[in-house]
Image (cartoon, rainbow, N blue to C red):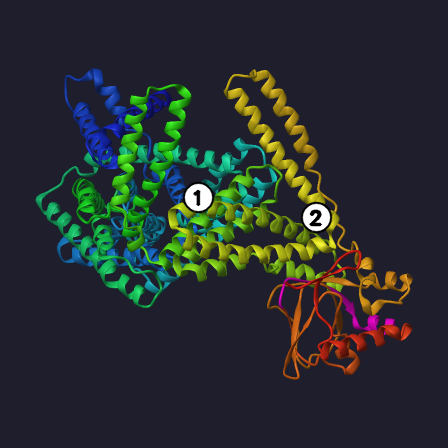
């Protein structure tokens, strides 16, 4: 019987209606959604089969026939649903947090699948009366774990976030590994030939590597396109839906790679770069959209696949039940052997953080199987090249094992998590909870008193509510062991993690201001903020400071642009890099100022004065580095700096103006028509601010040269000619400028910052107004010592030939260089860090 389109749509509507009622029912009876959906699907399939094969139920026969003959096969399950499920699972994972668990996830996703396949296949082989290849094929089919039910339980009862992360991370590549092994084995079974293991291993790894390359490349290309069409949320969301299907089909049908791995890699790429590519409000909308799509997809794939269970289980015997039990025990043994046997090896070799025994126990019992296992079993039963005894064996054993994991493991996993106390906060979080609630209730009581006075509530009502809040606060303070539960070191670590998270929040809020900063700058700042969170979590203060410092030195892209500028006089790349660096430093300065205020206003009451002082010192030092780097640029490009800061402030003002009009609209003080007109006016002002600022890389070089004492007496015309030959150079603290005995090919005129070299047992410093390398050139051909930067330094690089020509034309330059060098060696010359436009100098602090 051919099912019409109207009947298909009506059936889908009926199934989604069922799912809508199943979700609240599952929560009410404390059962995982997917388990209850599976039970309903099995019942639907069984009832439909009974109706079709019985007499006297003609009224329902059409509907039952539609359910049984629903036009979807194994290929439909994998092609329609799998890209959505895998992509959203990857996109929902915190890539930075998962990076620390890479070894653990690869072990669970790849090694565990291989071990499970082999263990199940070898355990079945003596009893199944099938070939070893067929038994291994069954092992690969049931090796795919389904994280949806497990993750749902963990989220609902508040299990440890790391446990949830491990389960979801495992599921990303687990399906890919199992499907890759399945493809190799099913080809061997259908073609009736032996497996070439060396060839199979090469194919397996080539599929993985090739798929990862395609996934990253297509995802990055998609994000570039999204950046180009900025401001069209519907189009941006549509491209994220196109992406998983594009990479899945490209790899699976065209390149011969793993479509699942490509989709997972694309999802992880979007997860890593999404927050800095999409505006925050659009990113939130896309995540909500994908959560809804996955709810529909996971519900439909579960209910449609479990409706096939009665069909797949038709003809089961007592011996099949024994084989199902063998598979069950073999799968648990294999999973336990990997988790309890190999995870400690990773911890011992420091390839991954230790996994507690309670986590391991839960992960062993939480290896549920679901829709993908049923879809792969269905693919075997639908394969015309595989004989019926094999399809019967695969269909019944795989389906029976899925039912056991869902009905036994799935229904008891919640109680296991509660029994092992994995739903409780860690001692550190518990101490923080008491501390925060105790302080927070005190603030709430004060606000309630103010509101009650404003609204005229009676004194008795007010005192009753406030008294209850105060009693709760006292109870929390009595249970508070914050001072004893956390050492000073741990409290500093908690504070730094909080600050890094707050910095990320501030950056995302600034990113909402359209045109405030380029995506590349915001991407760099957000990536650094996330690295600071990881660094503080793993290595405390040292890790936080190290990650924070990485944003200040010029990037490789900046260094390449600087090389092109100095050696080939190609200015445009360095010009764009300088513009981005200006933006980055100004925004970092704004964030740093906000963080210091946040520490004193919000964190000091919770963590105490002593911890706040330590954290403030860390932030103060980093803020000083940012200010030094920014001042080195502002000195030379003061006009551009003022224009950029003005534009940023005007964009912030427009954001405030927009918020003010929205508030007036919510309070019904202005009409919708007037609000639209006001928004139109704001958009016009924003459009004017989108015009790029002009940045002249060589601006002010001639004026800077005139400020150097060594060039006193040199005509303006000569300095004007020299300015055309000069290039710009920036150094970070600790960076080497000249090596000892190195031939001097460039003279560096220092505009700002501080340099140092060791000579004749003394540390000698060079500052603004000094010529680095000039004295060495006059006293010989090579540098007398290694010179490195102590601060962010701004230099003008003068080619040796041009400097020598200037000294030949104007001998006064040579005399003044020697005079200043003699004074410096005698200790009579104090280095300065800045020389202003009017020739005034500023000494080092």
Quadrant, the C terminus: bottom right
**Percent from the top left, x then y, of residue 463?**
30, 26
Question: In front of the other: label 2 or label 1?
Answer: 1
Q: Name the secondary structure under disc 1.
A: helix
Q: Nearer the viewer, residue 283 or 608?
A: 608
Q: Is residue 812 visible?
A: yes
Q: What residue sits 55% from the left and 41% below the top?
A: 511
Q: Does 607 appear above or below 811? A: above
Q: Nearer the viewer, residue 406 or 791?
A: 791
Q: Which residue is mark 2?
A: 641
Identify which residue, 609 or 261, lies in the foreground. 609
Q: x, y (%) of residue 571?
A: 74, 56
> Is residue 264 a member of the stretch shown in magenta?
no
Q: Marks 2 and 1, Cα distance to the nearest angstrom?
A: 32 Å
Query: For residue 565, what is the image quadrant?
Result: bottom right
Q: Are marks 2 and 1 in contact (CB under 8 Å)?
A: no
What x and y, as percent, mark residue 648?
A: 64, 41
- Compared to residue 676, the image places residue 417 above or below, namely below
Q: Is residue 475 left or right of residue 519?
A: left
- Is residue 159 rendered to the left or right of residue 86? left
> Where 693 falls versus 444 (above or below)?
below
Residue 118 in sight from this viewpoint = no
Q: Nearer the viewer, residue 523 or 413?
A: 523
**In the image, what residue occupies the spot 22% across and 57% down?**
357
Q: Which mark is residue 602?
A: 1
Q: Indicate which disc, 2 or 1, sits on the residue closer to the N terminus.
A: 1
- What crowding class fits label 1: few (fewer than 14 Cα within 10 Å), some (14-19), or many (20 or more)? few
Q: Which quadrant: the N terminus?
A: top left
């Amino acid at each position: 019987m051919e099912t019409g389109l109207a009947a298909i749509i009506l059936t889908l509507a009926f199934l989604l209606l069922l799912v809508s009622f199943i979700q609240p029912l599952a929560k009410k009876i404390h059962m995982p959604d997917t388990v209850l959906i599976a039970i309903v699907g099995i019942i639907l399939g069984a009832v439909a089969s009974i109706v079709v094969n019985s007499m006297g139920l003609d009224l329902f026969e059409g509907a039952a026939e539609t359910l049984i003959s629903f036009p979807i096969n194994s290929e439909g399950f994998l092609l329609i649903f799998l890209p959505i499920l895998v992509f959203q699972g990857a996109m929902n994972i915190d890539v930075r947090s998962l990076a620390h668990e890479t070894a653990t996830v690869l072990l669970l996703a790849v090694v565990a699948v291989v071990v499970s396949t082999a263990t199940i296949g070898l355990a079945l082989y003596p009893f199944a009366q099938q070939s070893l290849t067929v038994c291994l094929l069954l092992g690969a089919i049931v090796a795919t774990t389904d994280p949806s039910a497990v993750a749902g339980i963990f989220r609902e009862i508040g299990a440890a976030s790391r446990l949830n992360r491990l389960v979801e991370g495992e599921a990303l590549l687990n399906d890919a590994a199992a499907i890759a092994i399945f493809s190799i084995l099913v080809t061997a079974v259908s073609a009736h030939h032996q497996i070439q293991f060396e060839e199979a291993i090469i194919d397996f790894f080539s599929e993985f590597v090739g798929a990862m390359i395609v996934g990253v490349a297509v995802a990055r290309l998609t994000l570039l396109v999204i950046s180009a069409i900025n401001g069209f949320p519907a189009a941006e969301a549509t491209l994220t839906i196109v992406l998983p299907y594009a990479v899945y089909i490209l790899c699976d049908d065209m390149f011969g790679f793993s479509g699942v791995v490509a989709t997972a890699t694309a999802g992880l790429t979007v997860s890593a770069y999404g927050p800095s590519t999409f505006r925050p409000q659009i990113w939130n909308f896309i995540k909500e959209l994908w959560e809804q799509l996955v709810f529909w997809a996971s519900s439909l794939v579960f209910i449609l696949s479990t409706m096939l269970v009665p069909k797949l289980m038709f003809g089961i015997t007592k011996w099949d039940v024994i084989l199902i039990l063998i598979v069950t025990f073999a799968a648990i043994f294999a999973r336990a052997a990997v988790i309890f046997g190999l995870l400690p090896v990773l911890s011992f070799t420091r390839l991954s953080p230790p996994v507690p025994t309670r986590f391991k126990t839960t992960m062993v019992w939480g290896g549920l199987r679901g829709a993908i296992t049923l879809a792969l079993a269905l693919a075997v039963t639908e394969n015309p090249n595989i004989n019926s005894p094999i399809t019967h064996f695969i269909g019944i054993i795989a389906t029976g094992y899925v039912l056991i994991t869902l009905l036994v493991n799935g229904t008891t996993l919640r109680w296991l998590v509660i029994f092992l106390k994995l739903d409780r906060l860690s001692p550190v979080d518990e101490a923080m909870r008491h501390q925060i609630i105790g302080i927070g209730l005190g603030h709430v009581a004060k606000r309630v008193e103010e509101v009650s006075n404003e609204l005229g509530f009676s004194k008795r009502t007010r005192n009753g509510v406030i008294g209850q809040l105060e009693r709760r606060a006292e109870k929390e303070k009595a249970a508070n062991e914050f001072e004893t539960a956390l050492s000073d070191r741990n409290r500093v670590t908690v504070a730094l993690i909080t600050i890094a998270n707050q910095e990320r929040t501030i950056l995302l809020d600034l990113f909402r201001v359209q045109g405030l900063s380029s995506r590349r700058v915001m991407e760099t700042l957000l990536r650094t903020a996330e690295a600071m969170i990881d660094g503080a979590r793993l290595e405390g203060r040292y890790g936080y400071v190290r990650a924070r410092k990485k944003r200040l030195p010029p990037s490789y892209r900046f260094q390449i642009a600087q090389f092109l500028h100095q050696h080939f006089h190609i200015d445009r790349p360095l010009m764009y890099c300088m513009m981005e660096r200006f933006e980055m430093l100004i925004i970092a300065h704004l964030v740093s100022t906000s963080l210091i205020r946040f520490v004193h206003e919000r964190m000091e009451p919770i963590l105490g004065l002593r911890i706040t002082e330590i954290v403030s010192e860390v932030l103060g030092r980093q803020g000083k580095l940012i200010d030094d780097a920014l001042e080195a640029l502002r000195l030379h490009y003061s006009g551009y700096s003022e224009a950029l800061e003005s534009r940023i402030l005007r964009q912030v003002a427009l954001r405030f103006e927009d918020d003010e009009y929205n508030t007036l609209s919510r309070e019904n003080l202005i009409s919708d028509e007037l609000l639209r007109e006001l928004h139109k006016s704001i958009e016009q002002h924003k459009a004017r601010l989108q015009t790029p600022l002009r940045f002249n890389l060589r601006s002010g070089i001639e004026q800077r040269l005139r400020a150097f004492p060594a060039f006193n007496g040199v005509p303006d015309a000569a300095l004007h000619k020299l300015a055309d030959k000069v290039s710009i150079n920036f150094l970070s603290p600790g960076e080497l400028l000249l090596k000892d005995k190195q031939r001097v090919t460039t003279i560096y005129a220092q505009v700002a910052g501080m340099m140092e070299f060791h000579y004749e047992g003394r540390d000698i410093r060079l500052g603004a107004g000094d010529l680095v390398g000039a004295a060495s050139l006059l006293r010989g051909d090579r540098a007398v010592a290694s010179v490195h930067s102590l601060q962010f330094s701004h230099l003008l690089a003068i080619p040796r030939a041009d400097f020598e020509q200037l000294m030949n034309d104007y001998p006064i330059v040579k005399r003044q260089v020697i005079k200043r060098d003699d004074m410096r060696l005698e200790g009579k010359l104090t280095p300065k860090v800045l020389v202003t436009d009017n020739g005034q100098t500023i000494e080092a602090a």
